[in-house]
Image (cartoon, helix red, strand yellow):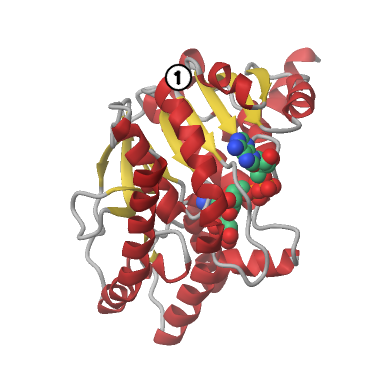
Amino acid sequence: LCTSLISSIAPKYIRYASTGSGVTHAKKVAVLGASGGIGQPLSLLLKLSPLISDLSLYDIQHTKGVGADLSHIETRAKVKAYVGKDELADALKGMDLVVIPAGVPRKPGMTRDDLFNTNATIVADLVSACAKNCPRAIIAIIANPVNSTVPIASEIMKAHNVYDEKKIVGVTTLDVVRAATFVAEAKGLDPTRVFVPVIGGHSGNTIIPLLSQVSPPVSFSQQELDSLTTRIQNAGTEVVDAKAGAGSATLSMAHAGARFSFSILEALNGKEGVVECGFIASQETEFKYFATPLLFSRNGVEKSMGVGKLSEYETKLIEKAKKELNGNIQNGIEFAKQYL
Ligand code: NAD
Ligand code: LMR
């Protein structure tokens, strides 16, 4: 009976357990902002994974309760909860991966850039603590505006002389998740088998889905291209408006954040060919930071896979994104100078 029970439970976890040697090389992961709308379900999904040996939950409030709750789940990750600035250093020591969903979310009528004044300082404080306590960890930034918080994080790591461009990534996975869902819906495909690269940044016009590079290959009319592109670019706002003042995407983001984290952890464990899109310091584009598909390795981001062959339509989308993306990046760099 026991054996058959275990095998009936096991498949539910396979999605989170993933493959290969990961189970024997479980890693230490911290979630900063763990009590929030994203932080709680993200921590739950991470707790389910045997890729993780230690799950460190940090927030300025409520983490003791979230931690006690999650710690009763019968999976391997040891959960520890840390609350308040005095406990931040301990939350970070020894971490391999730090995921940051701390910060305020949008309300209807706001842009992501409207969150800058509050979230820039939150991210700067948290990344400063990473520089001191886990300088070699990969830092995955969910907090908005991602187009600015990633440059802020990079400048802070530089100032502490611990910058490694392979290790600071803005999480744009939700754009990829949404693009796959919407394309699958439009074309009657299985969404779990659709991949749509999304490049650029993570706000409005700067979100650039590459509908000419969908896998499996599909073709779109101009009208489909326009409506899918607009929907993918405005999907965050679609959720903000539907939540009507109660915040922005949390559950789909938790899934996206978990997917991104598991990919990184698998690559850290030596799995080859792990690719996810992410927003990083860019070598091969004209932008200082740019999201592209990234190949991950034991070191973090091994390399950008580039943007591939763009259609005329996509080239125009990049042109349209230029001003906003460069402005957001520059705001982040300027903020960091004043903060430091
Ligand atoms: P939320 O308000 O529900 O949760 C935020 C949490 O951060 C709260 O628990 C709060 O106590 C905590 N926090 C605030 N200051 C902190 C600090 N200094 N240190 C640690 N924790 C702190 O918000 P949410 O819905 O979870 O969204 C969080 C952020 O994620 C927002 O900025 C939102 O815009 C962003 N977001 C990004 C994406 C993306 O695709 N990258 C998607 C959705 C949301
Ligand atoms: C999203 O894309 O859902 C997030 O960036 C949250 C937001 O403000 O839209």
Q: In this image, 307 relative to 63: left or right?
A: left
The residue that disc 1 covers is: 133
Q: Is residue 25 above or below residue 229?
A: above
- x and y percent of residue 203 in the render? 47, 63
- x and y percent of residue 303 in the render? 24, 41
Q: In this image, 216 relative to 5: left or right?
A: left
Q: Is residue 32 above or below residue 239?
A: above
Number of numbered discs present? 1
Q: Residue at 40% of width from left, 85% of height from top?
A: 222
Secondary structure under the numbered disc 1 in the rendered image: helix
Which amino acid type is marked by label 1? Asn
Where's the C terminus, which quadrant? top left
Q: Is residue 153 above or below residue 242?
A: above
Where's the N terminus, which quadrant? top right
Q: Residue at 57% of width from left, 51% of height from top?
A: 118
- x and y percent of residue 174 in the render? 52, 54
User: Residue 90: which quarter of the image?
Assistant: top right
- x and y percent of residue 136 in the render? 36, 23
User: Residue 44: which quarter of the image?
Assistant: top right
User: Is residue 288 visible to the viewer in this orientation of the structure?
Assistant: yes
Q: Residue at 41% of width from left, 78% of height from top?
A: 220
Q: In this image, 55 relative to 131: left or right?
A: right
Depth check: give the residue in front, 200 or 226.
200
* Mark 1 neighbour class, 10 Å CA radius: few under 14, some 14 to 19, many 20 or more: some
